Image (tube, grey):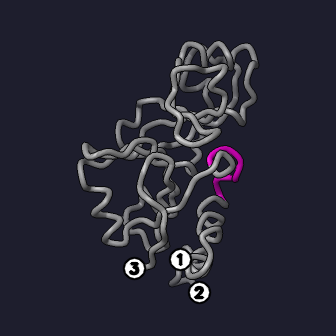
Amino acid sequence: MISNKTTLQAGTLLVSPPVQSDVNFKRAVILVCEHSEEGSFGLILNRSLALTIDQVVEEFEGHREDVRWGGPVQPKTLHFLHRVPDIIPGGIDIKPGVVWSGNFELAKVAIENKMIQPGDIRCYLGYAGWSAGQLQQEIENGGWILADSTSKSVFEIPDESLWRRTLRGLGGSYSILANYPEYPSLN
């Protein structure tokens, strides 16, 4: 198993290895929002859905921001990340420029009144979750590669290139993994 020095904690990125067998997490990049002895919670950053926020939240009629698939757990729940804590208070700081959740009513007002740019908030249906010790065990078994997150990796890198760019950013052997073909049997 290849390892790096990233520590598992809130703000860590979980990068699926190229041979991930679980289709839910194939080439996924997950932001860990919470990690404790009781378990872990994360959102898949690079899975766009064919939905916009106005299709999910009735009060957002006409707002066309994309909604992403956060993971297979409770797929009808809505979660959000943002980088405007002065406009949407009450969230949990994950990293500088990355806040998880906050006052949803104020988020709706901010979106409706165009107080925030579409690139400053991302909405997700569902989440990825692990029970106590489960995620650490998966990491030890080679099921995830750890990387550091930044506001840019959460909000600015396009979904289709996030997995590859994150691995390349780790350098060394990870750069080689970034080039692993999605369907090796077709080569």
Q: Which residue is rendered at x = 76% and y = 19% of the image?
A: 114
Residue 167 screen position, x and y as percent: 59, 69
| Nearer-N-terminus badge (3/1) | 3
Q: Which residue is rendered at x = 51% and y = 55% of the image?
A: 13
Compared with 90, 20 (above or below) is below
Is the residue marked by circle 1 packed among few (<14), some (14-19), or many (20+) residues within 10 Å? few
Which residue position is annotated with label 3? 1
| Quarter of the image where one finds residue 118 | top right
Is 65 covered by the magenta stretch? no
Q: Which residue is rendered at x = 48% and y = 71% of the image?
A: 4
Q: CA distance from mark 3 to mark 1?
A: 21 Å
Secondary structure of the residue carrying tag 3 is loop
Q: CA distance from mark 2 to mark 3?
A: 24 Å
Secondary structure of the residue carrying tag 1 is loop
Which stretch appears magenta?
154-160
Amino acid at pointer 3: Met
Is the residue marked by circle 3 packed among few (<14), some (14-19), or many (20+) residues within 10 Å? few
Compared with 21, 187 (above or below) is below
| Quarter of the image where one finds residue 175 | bottom right
Which residue position is annotated with label 2? 187
Q: Is residue 121 left or right of residue 80?
A: right
Amino acid at pointer 1: Tyr
| Nearer-N-terminus badge (2/3) | 3
The numbered dot on residue 183 is: 1
Amino acid at pointer 2: Asn
Q: Which residue is rendered at x = 73% and y = 24% of the image?
A: 116
Q: CA distance from mark 2 to mark 1?
A: 8 Å
Is the residue marked by circle 2 packed among few (<14), some (14-19), or many (20+) residues within 10 Å? few
Query: Is residue 79 or residue 56 the one in the foreground?
Result: 79
Instruction: Tell me, yes or no, whether the two marked residues, 2 and 1, touch with CB atoms within 8 Å.
Output: yes
